[in-house]
Image (cartoon, grey):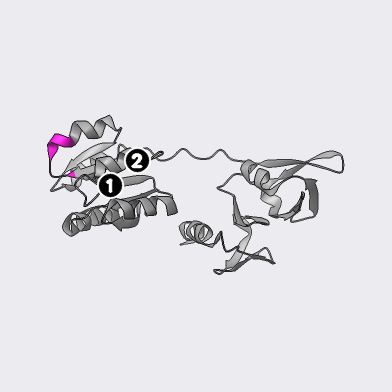
């Protein structure tokens, strides 16, 4: 699945791209923006794999906007003017679509985008506890809780306490399996039973969702469960 964002100020052109995206099951449209500043905000708030970018945007032009992005997603340019193609390829765009865009040409361009490489599977987490190295299968972890300079790793069978920071623990965990939901909690996504905007049930444990995490957590859960 490739998540997509459209930045296009022409309603008809945007409608055509939206329709084409809906016809391809491996594409998922996350939003449509009418200018570069809206697009920048969307890119900062969501994980986007593929950007359909119009060159002639109001205010900040498409190519100038693209130059400002430090780690842009895959980009397919759209425009009615073929003379900008070379400049686009100099910015490592995937393809260049001339309006009016034909569906076969759209599919050809999209097929050039390679899905993001899968995150390697993580099977174990090793921690130091009671002067021993404890090897914990990640599938058994329910949540991890910060307790000042210590963290508690709660599994389905028991809890382990280790002297470690939650931030460092987060860096070691596979983000496809675990999610930071609070300054004091990381949860296993597979153990979520229910959730709201403020809390979640993780294998029977009610865990709060921190105010600073609600937006990112909500987006992640929406992507996974809806």
Q: Quadrant of the C terminus?
A: bottom left
| Marked residue nearer the N-terminal end (1 or 2) | 1
Question: In the image, is residue 226 above or below residue 24?
Answer: below
Find residue 31 and report its horizontal and vertical position in percent: 33, 57
Q: What kind of element bears circle 1?
A: strand
Residue 80 is covered by the magenta coloring: yes
| Separation (CA) of disc 1 from disc 2 | 16 Å
Q: Residue 78 sits in which quadrant?
A: top left
Residue 46 is covered by the magenta coloring: no
Q: Report crowding for label 1: few under 14, some 14 to 19, many 20 or more residues within 10 A (C-alpha).
A: many
Q: Please name which of the two marks, 1 or 2, marks the residue nearer to the observer.
A: 2
Q: Is residue 107 in sight in this rendering?
A: no
Find residue 152 and report its horizontal and vertical position in percent: 76, 53
Question: In the image, is residue 123 above or below residue 190?
Answer: above
- Marking on residue 52: 1
Report which residue position mark 2 lands on: 68
- Farthest residue to the front: give it: 59
Residue drawn 53% across and 40% down? 119
Please name whichever residue, 56 or 115, is drawn nearer the observer in this view of the structure.
Answer: 56
Q: What kind of element bears circle 2?
A: helix
The reply, left or right, for residue 172 in relation to residue 6 is right
Find residue 62 and report its horizontal and vertical position in percent: 25, 44
Q: Are marks 1 and 2 in contact (CB under 8 Å)?
A: no
- Marking on residue 101: none
Find residue 143 and report its horizontal and vertical position in percent: 69, 56
| Total marks placed | 2
Residue drawn 61% across and 54% down? 180
Q: Is residue 198 in sight in this rendering?
A: yes
The reply, left or right, for residue 130 in relation to residue 39 is right
The reply, left or right, for residue 121 in relation to residue 206 is left
**What segment carries the magenta color?**
79-84
């Amino acid at each position: 699945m490739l998540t997509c964002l459209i930045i296009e100020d022409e309603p008809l052109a945007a409608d055509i791209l939206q329709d084409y995206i809906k016809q391809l099951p491996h594409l998922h449209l996350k939003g449509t923006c009418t200018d570069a500043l809206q697009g920048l905000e969307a890119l900062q708030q969501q994980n986007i794999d593929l950007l359909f970018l119009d060159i002639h945007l109001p205010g900040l032009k498409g190519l100038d906007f693209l130059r400002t992005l430090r780690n842009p997603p895959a980009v397919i340019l759209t425009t009615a003017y073929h003379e900008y193609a070379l400049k686009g390829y100099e910015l490592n765009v995937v393809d260049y679509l001339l309006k009016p865009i034909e569906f076969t040409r759209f599919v050809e361009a999209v097929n050039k985008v390679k899905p993001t490489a899968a995150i390697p599977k993580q099977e174990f987490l090793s921690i130091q506890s009671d002067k021993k190295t404890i090897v914990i299968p990640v599938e058994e972890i329910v949540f991890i809780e910060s307790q000042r300079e210590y963290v508690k790793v709660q599994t389905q069978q028991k809890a382990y306490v280790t002297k470690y920071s939650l931030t460092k623990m987060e860096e070691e965990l596979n983000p496809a399996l675990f999610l930071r939901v609070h300054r004091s909690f990381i949860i296993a996504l597979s153990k979520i039973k229910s959730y709201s905007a403020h809390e979640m049930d993780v294998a029977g444990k009610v865990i709060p969702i921190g105010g600073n995490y609600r937006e990112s957590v909500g987006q992640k859960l929406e992507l996974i469960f809806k």
